[in-house]
Image: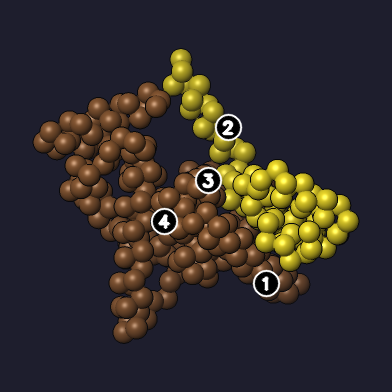
Amino acid sequence: MNDQQCHDDTIIARCKNGDASSFEYLVLKYQDKVFNLCRYLLKNQQDAEDAAQEAFIKAFNNISSYTPHSPFYAWLSRIVVNTCVDSQRKRSLLSMFFSDNGQEHIDIHPTHIPNPETAYETQQSMLALQASLKQLSLKLRTVIVLKEFEGLSYEEIADLLDLSVGTVKSRISRARDELTKNMKKMRNKFFFQTF
Amino acid sequence: MNCSKAIKNMSAYLDTELHDLERGQLEAHLIGCPACFQRLEELRALQTFFQPPLQNKAQQILQQVSWDK
């Protein structure tokens, strides 16, 4: 167990003893990661903000069920993913009655400051990737986001989503195949529009 | 290993999630199959889109350096 995990566990022990203000430390520490994960999983910025907030509230309300056998963020990210899946389900039900243009922009690398010389090319690639991610089903988007943005291993993703490692392997493979096909289509479309 | 099996294993290969035996079989197949090799390169290119630009990493390193001082 590393120093960071020990420190988290000390804070969590205080939370469990009724010190609600200690939870603020955890929110400040993980809010960027949680919010980015929500943005990658959900298509809408407002939904992502709501899901991130809801996930922290759930974490706080269930902090007594956390045991320091695994890192706190692994436990928290499970709550975040489940909250996003619920949010997406609600959104799907609502979209049966209300249209959603889905024009929100997902910043793939939120802290990235574009280099002017390569900005245009990078922007095109990022837009294509962003649009392709949106086209994936939530099942496939979730595994590829956890793999590529969260850097989790297949075993960690399987544990987080209650899936077998074989299913994770298969879904990541399908997600990449679909992303590659979608991005090729967009590249061709862009080429013919430009020339 | 045939092409179908090779395609199924490519993603896991890039993620270093294959066992030694499967990795060896895939690499042997790739040597003799330009189509699968091309497909692997496409998947490898896709991975680079997910990686933050180098300047972002430089920024992170600089921030780390200032923290360490």
Front residue (pair B22, A32): B22
- Can the viewer see residue A194 in this picture? no
Q: Are marks 2 and 3 in contact (CB under 8 Å)?
A: no
| Residue with the most extreme left position | A18
> Which element carries disc 3, helix, strand or loop?
loop
Determine the chain carrying the residue at label 4.
A
Is A77 left or right of B47, judged from the image as shown? left
Q: Comparing marks 2 and 3, which lies closer to the viewer? A: 3
Front residue (pair A124, A38): A38
For chain B, what colour was chosen? Answer: yellow
Count residues near mark 2 (Cα–Cα under 10 Å), then give few for <14, some for 14-19, many for 20+. few
- Mark positioned earlier in the residue sequence (3 or 4): 3
| Residue with the most extreme right position | B32
- Can the viewer see residue A173 in this picture? yes
Residue for point 61% across, 67% down:
A178
User: Distance between the Cα atoms at labels 3 and 4?
Assistant: 12 Å
Determine the chain carrying the residue at label 2.
B
Q: Comparing marks 2 and 1, which lies closer to the viewer? A: 1
The residue identified by callout 1 is: A185
Is A194 left or right of A21, judged from the image as shown? right
Is B11 left or right of B1, judged from the image as shown? left
> Which element carries disc 4, helix, strand or loop?
helix
Residue A91's place in the image compared with A39, above or below, is below
Query: Same chain, marks 2 and 1?
Result: no
The residue identified by callout 4 is: A161
Count residues near mark 3 (Cα–Cα under 10 Å), then give few for <14, some for 14-19, many for 20+. some
User: Distance between the Cα atoms at labels 1 and 3?
Assistant: 29 Å
Q: Comparing marks 2 and 4, which lies closer to the viewer? A: 4
Identified by mark 2, the residue type is: Ala
